[in-house]
Image (tube, rainbow, N blue to C red):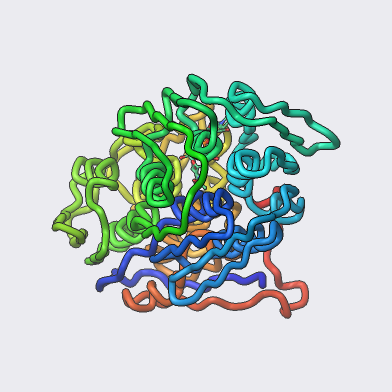
Amino acid sequence: MESKMKIIGGVPLRGSIEAQGAKNATLPVMAAAILLKDQKLSISRVPDLLDVNTMADLLRSLGASVTFSGHEMEISVPGEISWETPSDLVRKMRASSLVLGPLLARCGRAVMPLPGGCSIGSRPIDLHLKGLTRMGATIELVHGAVHATTKGLVGSRIYLDFPSVGATENLMMAAVFARGETVLENTAREPEIFNLVEALRSMGASIEADGTGVIRISGVDTLHSASSRIIPDRIEICTYLLAGVATGGEVTVTDIIPNHIDSLLAKLEEAGATLKVEDSRVTVYPGERIKSVSLKTLPYPGFPTDLQPQIMTALCLAEGTSVIQESVFQSRFLHVSELNKMGAKIDIQSNSAVITGVERFTGADVVATDLRAGAALVIAGLAAGDTTMVYHLGHICRGYEAMEEKLLRLGARVQVISTEKEDGKGGPSFPGPSC
Ligand code: UD1
């Protein structure tokens, strides 16, 4: 259902909310269930998100049974499943490509439509396919779909040209049943990778991963039923902290793992924000206007690209000029023109954004072009002196559970309005598929 968010800004947020489970940890852990035969995977702290429900539908389409309520999910996988993924679901969410590795490992074949481009960049899966080929898969592209087959994957040494999160996860799952040892080098080191490692280990996989970017997997014959718990969503946590900073409020987020958000905390401290970090909670306090800072997005433990739009919003209100360099995705600046409509002063120069601080945002009708761009616009709306309407809220529902409820709890004046029945009032349109 398409919807928009009406925000009457200018209220400093105040209060405490709990972090949701991480979307980007949940999706690969769900995909890992495909490796089971006549067994179950129980997952706790699962966020109720559009993307999570899309992955559940994808698993169902392959033959698994998925139940999901109250943040608890159970995935039962029969002895026989389909190896063909439906194109409507794969096109709906790029992370659907995470089923390729486990399907190939389990069934010896997989058919998956190529996920294609999306609004934040071309996002190829060449590293996934190169790695699978090195493990003995034959990959063909037939009418825009990947057809992968193998008579049995074999352990190999695979060096990733870039520490891709998805490629690391796909190859790790593919290697679980491969004959011998697989050594993945230059892997991603995001906390979500280690959530998947823990889940696979609890299912009986043999994996060594010490956080140095090298992961060793010794093939096993079979896995068994298990349970797994999802880590807190570091991007969601930081989004609410940045909303606190931008509105000059006092926001506490609980149930967090502080060292997962070190890169943001360091930048906020550098900008002069007042913070308190405790065992499993963090608070931002009102203080002086923050100062400009510069940063570059990088793979973890660097500053996350998934927070770039949200911190840009906060830096629009900082004193001085900040520079943000986007090095992970090609075109992740779609929020910039919308922020400029709200009075921001941002210039794009190649892959950098030069942000000249302004005193305040002005409310406007703006369009969420993707998940994190949408979150950035919500933060700007909360900080603006008047009313903002954020269209295409569906993007935000992909990654933020109950955002309206959480913001209301923090004292914001927000309302989600369905636009489906409002003839001709669906808001400004924006080209480009979701991702
Ligand atoms: C994951 C996250 C996403 C986050 C991104 C980077 C999930 C479900 N999504 O996406 O929210 O923004 O990590 O932190 O976890 N690349 C290639 N070839 C490949 C694979 C990737 O060129 O085979 C490039 C991509 O185009 C992109 C960069 O590498 O420019 C990072 O991609 P990757 O780390 O793979 O991100 P995802 O796993 O897609």
**On the picture, is 208 further left or further right than 119?**
left
Q: Residue at x 69, y 55 (%)?
A: 80
Q: Residue furthest front?
A: 221
- Is 347 above or below relative to 240? above
- Residue 233 x, y percent position in the rendering: 37, 56
- Is 362 above or below relative to 69? above
- Image quadrant in which you'd find residue 54: bottom right
Q: Residue at x 39, y 30 (%)?
A: 215
- Image quadrant in which you'd find residue 365: bottom right
- Residue 424 x, y percent position in the rendering: 77, 72
User: In which quadrant will I find the N terminus?
Assistant: bottom right
Front-most of 184 and 114? 184
Q: Residue at x 60, y 39 (%)?
A: 105
Front-most of 67 and 336? 67
- Residue 149 x, y percent position in the rendering: 72, 33
Exactly how many numbered labels are in the figure? Answer: 0
- Is 168 above or below relative to 410? above
**On the picture, is 41 further left or further right than 370?**
left
- Image quadrant in which you'd find residue 109: top right
- Residue 145 x, y percent position in the rendering: 78, 38
Looking at the image, can residue 360 be seen? no
**On the picture, is 60 further left or further right than 290?**
right
Front-most of 200 and 300? 200
Q: Residue at x 40, y 67 (%)?
A: 385
Looking at the image, can residue 32 be seen? yes
Q: Residue furthest right?
A: 143
